[in-house]
Structure formats: structure tokens, C-alpha cells
Amino acid sequence: MSLQEYKEKRNFRQTPEPVAKERKTDKQRIFVVQKHAASHLHYDFRLEDEGVLKSWAVPKGPSMNPADKRLAVMVEDHPLDYASFEGEIPEGNYGAGIVEIWDSGNWELNDDAVNVEDALQTGSLEFSLNGKNLKGKFILFKMKKAGENNWLLIKKKDEYAITEKYDANKIKPVGE
Ligand code: MN
């Protein structure tokens, strides 16, 4: 697990984002979704694993409707401290724009026996979220034919799933 790419992309004298510091993961793993109004609005979906945040950029944002397959582009690991980051990344810096916390909480594997690294290598991770906006079972899986970093984030059918149209832009960020 390395934050090298995260470090290389940023100048910490110019951006208020957290420096790259690796930390130990507690038993309770956190997740966060940050609404990021950069050159293109997107949602950064992050799951804590092994002391860092595994991260995907989701252009349309997550959905609670299992009919939606949301493109999620895997990006560089972020430091755990990033989970509480909100603010403005100044013009001229990587990812310049406003970051706000859209949702946060804990996540867990649907099957305790699964090793997260192995699941990510295989390209299929099933998990549950306990957030304010996002709840219940989800799956992330890697698209085989597309670019190597393209995944799909999909809600699984459960008691939290909805059948109505879901638009993350219309859901209030938890930070507000
Ligand atoms: Mn972003």
C-alpha cells in the first residue's frame, strides 16, 4: 500500500489537502463520499483498507437504485486523514475546486472471509455501507473490456434499495 502517487500529484505547500501519512486501520473501517466540484463535478468514493483510502471517482455519484450501474474510475490511494477533508483546492493545483463531504460512515465486507486486496485484484468487492445517504449492500466490479481502472458501483437489492430515480446532486451532503 503506497501513497507515492498521491504525494507526486500534489504540492502540500499549495493545497490544504492532508499530507501523505499512512496510519493503522482500526477494526471499524470508514468510508467517505466527497462531492468534488473540480473541472468536472464528480463524487470520490473512498473505502478504508490497510491504513489508506481505496478511491474511485464516480462521475454521476452513487445510486441507491439497483438498476443504476455507475462508472467508478479507480484512482490513487488517499491517506486516511483525507476522510475528513473539506475545502477548496486552489486554482493551479491537482483537482482544483471545492470538496465537501457528501456522505460518511462505516463499511464492512459482506463476507468476513474475503481479503480486500484479493477481491480488488479479482475485480469484485461486495460490501455494506452504513452512512447517512448510502445504506446496505453494494458491489464494485471491474469492467473487463474497458480501461484497466474502470469499475461499476452498483446497489444490491435489499431493504434499503429504492426503485425511484436517484440523483446524488439532489441529495444533501451530510456536511451541511
Ligand atoms: Mn476528485
Image (cartoon, helix red, strand yellow):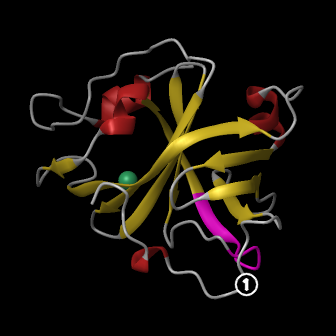
Horizontal and vertical percent for residue 136? 72, 55
- Observer-nearest residue: 141 or 170? 170
Horizontal and vertical percent for residue 9? 31, 36
Query: In percent of the image, x 44 and y 61: which residue is there?
Result: 43
Q: On screen, 63 above or below 52? A: below
Q: On screen, 94 above or below 135? A: above
Is 67 magenta? The answer is: yes
Horizontal and vertical percent for residue 54? 56, 36
- Observer-nearest residue: 45 or 170? 170
Q: As drawn, is 72 to the left or to the right of 118?
A: left
Q: Which residues are magenta?
A: 65-72
Horizontal and vertical percent for residue 26? 56, 17
SS for tag 1? loop
Q: As drawn, is 32 to the left or to the right of 85?
A: right
Q: Which residue is mark 1?
A: 163
Can you tell which quarter of the image residue 68 is in?
A: bottom right
